[in-house]
Amino acid sequence: MPERNVIWGSLLDAPNVHGDADLGPTALRHLIKLEPDLSANLALLSKIYAADGRWNDSTMVRKMIWDTGVQKMPDARR
């Protein structure tokens, strides 16, 4: 059985594919419990909100990244 974080990560990314920004916060709540220090999850939710035109929500998530001190993970492709 796949790890839970992989499943929730897929659900967090689903709004990018299906345009359903309401699924993002639910998936993120579970991911924060599983991977509290991974900034990519919060950054993806911010991106989902911005794509949906929810600029206040996007800004709020970015502020949460800043306020909690979650560190950006280095890009693995470099």
Image (cartoon, helix red, strand yellow):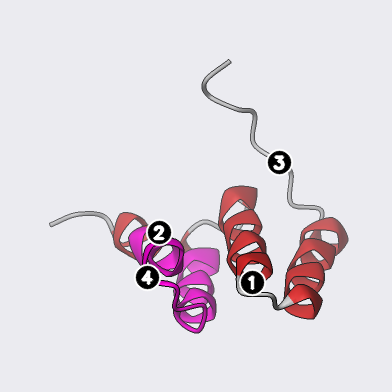
Read off the residue under disc 1.
Answer: 49
| Element under disc 4 | helix
Magenta part of the chain: 10-33
Q: Position of residue 60 (x, y in %)?
A: 80, 73
Q: Which mark, residue 18?
A: 4
Amino acid type at circle 2 is Gly
Mark 1 or mark 4, which is nearer the start of the sequence? 4
Q: Nearer the viewer, mark 1 or mark 3?
A: 1
Mark 2 or mark 3, which is nearer the start of the sequence? 2
| Element under disc 2 | helix
Read off the residue under disc 2.
Answer: 9
**Image quadrant occupied by the C terminus:** top right
Q: Position of residue 24 (x, y in %)?
A: 50, 74
Q: CA distance from mark 4 to mark 2?
A: 15 Å
Q: Position of residue 22 (x, y in %)?
A: 50, 84
Magenta region includes residue 28: yes
Question: Principal SS element in the magenta part?
Answer: helix
Amino acid type at circle 1 is Tyr
Mark 3 or mark 1, which is nearer the start of the sequence? 1
